[in-house]
Amino acid sequence: MDRFVLDFAHTLAGFMVLVSFMLLYQDRMFSLLNVFALQALVLAASVAWQAHVQDAPHLYVTALIALVLKAIIIPIVLHRVVVRLGIHRNIETVGGIGLTMLFGMGLVALSMVVMLRATAAADPLAREDLAFALSVVLLGLLMMVTRRNAVSQIIGFMSLENGLILAATGAKGMPLVVEISVAFSVLVALIVIGVFLFRIRERFDSVDVHALDESRGERQ
Amino acid sequence: MDNVSLALMCVAALLATAVLGVLVRRSAAASGLVYSLCLILSLAILAVAASQLLGGAGATEITRLPIGLPWVGANFRLDPLSSFFLVVIDLGAAAASLYALGYGRHEDAPERILPFYPAFLAGMNLVLLAADAFSFLVAWEFMSLTSWALVMAHHRDPENRRAGYIYLVMASFGTLALLLAFGLLAGPAGGYGFADMRVAVHAAWLPGLVLILALLGAGSKAGLVPLHVWLPLAHPAAPSHVSALMSGVMTKVAIYGFVRIVFDLLGAPVWWWSILVLGLGAVTVVLGVLQAVLQRDLKRLLAYSTVENIGIIFIGLGLALAFQANGMTGAAALSFTAALLHIFNHSLFKGLLFFGAGAVLNGTGERDIEKLGGLIRTMPQTAFLVLGGCLAISALPPLNGFVSEWLIFQAILVSPDLPQWGLKLVIPAVGALLALGAALSAACYVRAFGIGFLGRPRSPAASSAHEADRLSLAAMFMLLGLCVLAGILPGFLIDAVAPAVREAVGHAMPAQASLPWLSIVPVAESRSSYNGLLIFAFIVIATLLTVKSIHRLASRAMRRGPAWDCGYPEPSPLTQYTADSFAQPLRRVFGEFFLAREKVTMPKPEDPLPARLEVRLRDLAWDMIYFPIERTVALAGEKFNALQFLTIRRYLGLVFAALVSLLLVVAIWA
Amino acid sequence: MGMIRDLFLQGVQMFLVLAVAPLLLGFTRRAKAWLLRRKGPPLLQPYRDLLRLMRKEVVLAENASWLFRSAPYMIFAATWVAAALVPTFATGLQFSWTADLIVITALLGSARFFLALAGMDVGTSFGGIGSSREMMFASLAEPAMIMIVFTVALVAGTTQLSQVADFVFAHASLRVSLALALVALIIVALAENTRIPVDNPATHLELTMVHEAMVLEYSGRHLAVIELAAALKLSLYISLIASIFAPWGLAQGDAAPGAYVTAVVAYIGKLAVGGFLLVLFETSIAKMRVFRVPEFLGAAFMLGFLGTLLLFVSRTF
């Protein structure tokens, strides 16, 4: 039984990392959104499994929030935004997908080494979760760095946040209040960014964040 | 008389042959005489070294001659490690001499080769026999200079002169690094004998520094990236049998220098050394093979592929260091054996391939594979032999290149047991790069053989090619035979190098020859095993069975007709796929960033100008390291040029400042 | 006595893979036709094709060399030997220790080497394009394969396929690394067998084909042998995947004769399932542009590497 518990948690968390890579790999808007929804789904499953393992009912709430908010509402909203902005074309990536992937793998290796060293005394489940969570966070950051499109940067931000939640559930003891406030802040961020996006578009006729640099006079 | 003295006498005889070469250089029989003497003498040293290696395990002999440094003398020693390298070198030398007996007859300026060739052989042998730093360095420098003279044999070609110049600069740099390394090892007491260095106690910072110096010194001779830049220029410039020696054999002498310093003289390794060696090895593998895939000049392609194989050997050595540092002696022995086996194998097939390239050069006058094609019909035996060499170097079973790479992979698979996280994560990545290297090398040799030997002739030179002479073919057949034998009976080879492995890492792989069916088992039978003999037998049986049964039961009718090619008639051989077009997908996948620049000039519609595609190959090492150094040196030279126009008073001031600063140094240190 | 039995079983394996391979091909074609709501050729059609080709006379290009004529047999022999060394219905056969997973991959590499050379022998541009692309795919597929080997070897502690199968059978558990390795292996298998989305085995549109371009000049018995080798390779990869990731139903060591019969039936069942899944995947996806394939194979490499990394995590408890 114990073996199976560990294995299943391991599989779900590992799958999170994999989905992060799939996010990096996608270069079409809609599939990016779908993969993001998939990640949220896996996150929800993982959190729910942790709730079951740790016997902590408040984590079920977290899982539910992840499921409803991130797997359903946010993708649908973003989907609409993309349609209204008319940007279902390819995403420009910086440096090519292959290089980004290689860099991403380096990040995963790095986070494994750091986390496994730093948490040598912790219990294996939490250790593993932390290592995976740090990878997801770093990959989210990588995505924000490499993408130019504002919508994909939002996705990167959200997947980063997914990693944080994964870490928090593994660490046993994030209070529900924190979780709910985080969820709301994400929602607020979505709204703000959504409004922001339309503003950018109105102003620059593009959602490429390079347009912002230009307005700051950094490029001519 | 002991074996060392025997070997030394043979070396002396080689030197005498060099003098003889000077004397008789103009006569018609000179090349036959010199090369046959070289053949006999290399075979003699080969016999001595082989008897030393196979006879008494671990036996060591020392001879001291009263020349060289007065308090050290010139020490010569034959232990299993140097015996193994002597075997490799003299086997290669014997093959090259046999080949040159036929090939050398076509040489237009034999007087530029005959004196230096035996001297070069003598130099390489002396490096291996030397047992003190002084004789080692003298022999090393002698080897470098004689090989430089051979590179400059065809000195009228400006390309060759440039190659010779760069080679000389790099060789001096390498010797300098080795000099410093030995100086550090000898310490202030000046114990320049290897025996003294082995027992010396070093400061904690010293071994790491010596390792780096050894990497620089031996690596620049062996062709480790980024010190490889001279190699693809110099190796092809020499006559083909010398190219074979330089690529197949002299690089191994350099590796011997590294192994001698790091595994023998330096004491117990530290784990981070292996990361350095592994990283350099992996980079060397990938960059070497990527360059090889893109080359058009057959001999330069082979030279870049040598760079790749040197990388493979260094990966093996790096693994051995990693395991050794953590006390995993079994795994260290496995990796070191793999490295030695690859050293042996590479000397065989690289020799074979360079001989093949020489035969092609001789038969067609061309080295550019774009101008060859169809040689399998005009030079059938050479084509067969080169095909064998291509299979062996591409690490394909059941030939020998595969065995050594397989052993390295087996060593890599042991790496998760290492305690250091850095190594655990780096070594699988190195393994992936090694696999990439193997696959790319297959692509490289499919391209070289497919464009050069298959298809239709692309130039008149290729269509009127003639087959190589018998002696050259005999040398190639011998090497191919050894490749096959080493591939299907690797167990005997592993047992034969065991004494050398034991000397270097203190442990050897378990005896293999007594295993059932002659298979090899690196760690345990439940882990992995390989049986080249059975694979070979199965392939032969399956082939014969298929051919027989199809010819018997179905049909053996055959008719010749024009090529089908989807119904496109192709009158001109120029419509064939070219070497550049073959490499285009690889160039596009791997080379966009750093290997090749493409420029497409597309004329506007209705413009009668032809569309042009320009591809310029670059070597990253030149761009990143050597050109900046060159610029800095030129700049500094210009600045210092100003010193020529000073007043006497200022000159005196300079001298005075130098004196004071030297005194200050002494005051602070002493 | 034991020796004879072992040799007999090994021989059965050798000829079983040979006999089943065209059937698998026929089944995939048929199943594909079903999925496209067509009727499809009969199951045994590949056998008939092979027989017909073998009886026909060979039409050889005027300048074809001995290499061109002998390459089909070399390709076939190397593939056949590799296929005979992958556990199909039983583990621990007489010669299973002759080669481990790396050797089997390399044997396929030998076959590919000859195939690519054969494509260049006549000196046509289609042959060259096929060979060039094949070697590019191979150079990306091999690192991925090594990472898969690494993952599997880390889990099972061996690269010997029989031992891997026994280990997975005995200690089956949910491992994300194995799942990643499975996906990676499937990608590699698709590329190696030149299936959709990498190449289309059914097309003869010149510029989209890789394998077909290389064998364009072959006819008669030579073509038959090459086709058989391609069929063998497909069944080899499915057997490989089945033996590592679904080793259930394999006969072990010295089982009773009845067990072997069930094992053979199970093997054929696995091939059918594998073939059906392949076809299902192929019909639901379009062929890629050639220069998307490196990304596809790069994904396989990444999965394999990720699998290895994740294993390091899980090895800590």
Image (cartoon, helix red, strand yellow):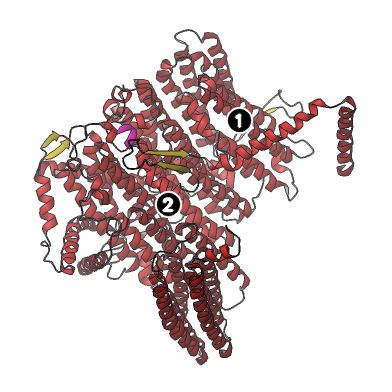
Q: Residue furthest top?
A: B27
Vertical order, B49 against B363 (above or below): below
Q: Nearer the viewer, residue C229 or A152?
A: A152
> Of label 2 and label 1, which has the lower sequence position?
1
Residue C263 has which mark?
Answer: none
Quadrant containing the N terminus of chain B is: top right
Q: Nearer the viewer, residue B547 or A88?
A: A88
Secondary structure at numbered mark 1? helix
Vertical order, B352 against B538 (above or below): above
Amino acid type assigned to the residue bearing label 2 in the image: Val
Residue A28: horizontal and vertical position, in percent? 39, 67
Residue B521 has which mark?
Answer: 2
Q: Quadrant of residue B558?
A: top left
Secondary structure at numbered mark 2? loop
Gap between marks 2 and 1 measured at Cα: 34 Å
Residue B253: horizontal and vertical position, in percent? 56, 34
Amino acid type assigned to the residue bearing label 1 in the image: Val
Q: Quadrant of residue A78?
A: bottom left
Identified at 30% across, 63% down, the residue is C91
Part of the protein shown in magenta: B450-456
Residue corresponding to mark 1: B127
